[in-house]
Amino acid sequence: MNLWRYESYAGLSAAEDCGILHGCENGRCIRVAEGYTCDCYQGYELDMTSMTCIDINECEDDVSVEFPCANARCVNTEGSFRCVCRRGYIMSRRPNHCVAA
Protein backbone atom coordinates (compact mmCIF):
# COMPACT_ATOMS: atom_id res chain seq x y z
CA MET A 1 0.00 0.00 0.00
CA ASN A 2 1.33 3.40 -0.94
CA LEU A 3 2.22 5.35 2.20
CA TRP A 4 2.76 8.62 0.31
CA ARG A 5 -0.31 10.76 -0.26
CA TYR A 6 -0.47 13.35 -2.99
CA GLU A 7 -3.08 15.76 -4.19
CA SER A 8 -4.99 14.42 -7.16
CA TYR A 9 -4.19 16.36 -10.32
CA ALA A 10 -7.57 17.82 -11.28
CA GLY A 11 -8.97 16.58 -14.57
CA LEU A 12 -6.44 13.82 -15.14
CA SER A 13 -8.11 10.50 -15.60
CA ALA A 14 -7.72 9.41 -19.22
CA ALA A 15 -4.51 7.78 -20.41
CA GLU A 16 -3.74 10.63 -22.81
CA ASP A 17 -4.13 13.22 -20.02
CA CYS A 18 -2.09 11.31 -17.48
CA GLY A 19 0.60 10.12 -19.85
CA ILE A 20 0.40 6.62 -18.35
CA LEU A 21 -0.88 3.62 -20.30
CA HIS A 22 -4.39 2.65 -19.12
CA GLY A 23 -4.63 5.98 -17.27
CA CYS A 24 -4.20 4.64 -13.72
CA GLU A 25 -7.01 2.10 -13.82
CA ASN A 26 -7.74 1.06 -10.19
CA GLY A 27 -6.04 4.21 -8.95
CA ARG A 28 -5.76 7.92 -9.59
CA CYS A 29 -3.25 9.88 -11.59
CA ILE A 30 -1.12 12.28 -9.59
CA ARG A 31 1.53 14.80 -10.55
CA VAL A 32 4.96 14.40 -8.97
CA ALA A 33 8.23 16.24 -9.59
CA GLU A 34 9.29 13.59 -12.13
CA GLY A 35 6.00 13.79 -14.09
CA TYR A 36 3.02 11.57 -13.27
CA THR A 37 2.41 8.40 -11.30
CA CYS A 38 -0.53 6.37 -10.03
CA ASP A 39 -1.81 6.38 -6.45
CA CYS A 40 -3.48 2.98 -6.27
CA TYR A 41 -6.78 2.35 -4.51
CA GLN A 42 -6.93 0.11 -1.42
CA GLY A 43 -6.43 -3.53 -2.43
CA TYR A 44 -4.10 -2.61 -5.31
CA GLU A 45 -0.39 -1.85 -5.56
CA LEU A 46 1.69 -0.10 -8.18
CA ASP A 47 3.60 -2.32 -10.59
CA MET A 48 6.56 -0.08 -11.40
CA THR A 49 7.44 -1.92 -14.62
CA SER A 50 4.04 -1.35 -16.25
CA MET A 51 2.98 1.68 -14.14
CA THR A 52 -0.38 0.04 -13.49
CA CYS A 53 -2.28 -0.75 -10.30
CA ILE A 54 -2.52 -4.50 -9.86
CA ASP A 55 -4.58 -6.55 -7.42
CA ILE A 56 -2.95 -7.50 -4.12
CA ASN A 57 -3.61 -11.12 -3.22
CA GLU A 58 -4.47 -10.71 0.47
CA CYS A 59 -4.60 -14.51 0.82
CA GLU A 60 -0.89 -15.03 0.11
CA ASP A 61 1.41 -15.63 3.07
CA ASP A 62 3.75 -12.72 2.34
CA VAL A 63 1.03 -10.05 2.39
CA SER A 64 0.73 -7.77 5.43
CA VAL A 65 -2.87 -8.88 6.19
CA GLU A 66 -2.24 -11.24 9.10
CA PHE A 67 -4.71 -14.16 9.23
CA PRO A 68 -7.37 -12.54 7.04
CA CYS A 69 -9.90 -15.32 7.79
CA ALA A 70 -10.58 -17.19 11.04
CA ASN A 71 -11.88 -20.79 10.69
CA ALA A 72 -12.30 -20.13 6.99
CA ARG A 73 -10.58 -20.31 3.61
CA CYS A 74 -9.42 -17.01 2.12
CA VAL A 75 -10.51 -16.34 -1.48
CA ASN A 76 -8.83 -13.49 -3.33
CA THR A 77 -11.15 -11.16 -5.27
CA GLU A 78 -10.38 -8.16 -7.48
CA GLY A 79 -9.21 -5.45 -5.05
CA SER A 80 -10.23 -7.38 -1.94
CA PHE A 81 -10.86 -10.88 -0.54
CA ARG A 82 -13.65 -12.91 1.03
CA CYS A 83 -13.77 -15.71 3.54
CA VAL A 84 -15.54 -19.03 2.99
CA CYS A 85 -16.32 -20.79 6.28
CA ARG A 86 -15.02 -24.31 6.86
CA ARG A 87 -17.55 -27.13 7.05
CA GLY A 88 -19.42 -26.94 10.37
CA TYR A 89 -18.82 -23.19 10.76
CA ILE A 90 -20.92 -20.13 9.95
CA MET A 91 -19.97 -16.47 9.49
CA SER A 92 -20.19 -14.51 12.73
CA ARG A 93 -21.08 -10.84 13.15
CA ARG A 94 -17.37 -10.14 13.42
CA PRO A 95 -15.98 -9.57 9.91
CA ASN A 96 -14.05 -12.51 8.41
CA HIS A 97 -14.55 -14.76 11.45
CA CYS A 98 -16.44 -18.02 11.35
CA VAL A 99 -17.79 -19.71 14.47
CA ALA A 100 -18.97 -23.28 15.11
CA ALA A 101 -22.50 -23.84 13.85
Image (cartoon, rainbow, N blue to C red):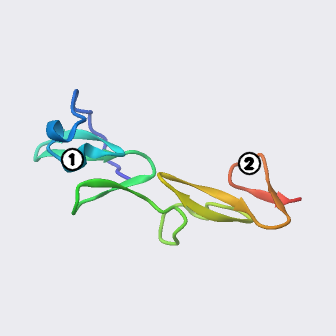
Q: What is the quadrant of residue 73 in the picture?
A: bottom right
Who's the residue at 59% across and 62% down the image?
A: 75
Residue flagged by tag 1: what amino acid is it?
Answer: Thr
Instruction: Name the spot of residue 8 as percent of width and height, x first.
Output: 26, 33
Q: Which residue is mark 1?
A: 37
Q: Residues within 10 Å of mark 1 (few under 14, many from 20)?
A: many
- N-terminal label among 1 and 2: 1
Who's the residue at 24% across and 60% down the image?
A: 48
Query: Which of the numbered marks, if any, corresponds to residue 10?
Result: none
Who's the residue at 79% across and 50% down the image?
A: 92
Q: Is residue 13 above or below residue 61?
A: above
- The residue nearer to you, when weighing 93 against 64, is 93
Who's the residue at 23% across and 59% down the image?
A: 50
Separation of residues labelled 1 and 2 (CA atoms):
37 Å
Does the CB distance between marks 1 and 2 fall below 8 Å?
no
Residue flagged by tag 2: what amino acid is it?
Answer: Arg
Q: Secondary structure at mark 2?
A: loop
| Picture quarter with the C terminus | bottom right
Q: Is residue 88 above or below residue 35?
A: below
Q: Is residue 58 left or right of residue 83?
A: left
Q: Is residue 6 above or below residue 34?
A: above
The residue most toward the right is: 101
Q: Secondary structure at mark 1?
A: strand
- The residue nearer to you, when weighing 14 against 33, is 14
Q: Which residue is mark 2?
A: 94
The residue most toward the left is: 34
- The residue nearer to you, when weighing 37 against 82, is 82
Q: Is residue 30 left or right of residue 81?
A: left
Q: Is residue 60 left or right of residue 45?
A: right
Instruction: Name the spot of residue 72 as percent of width and height, x first.
Output: 71, 64
Q: Is residue 39 left or right of residue 74?
A: left
Instruction: Name the spot of residue 57 as percent of width and height, x first.
Output: 48, 63
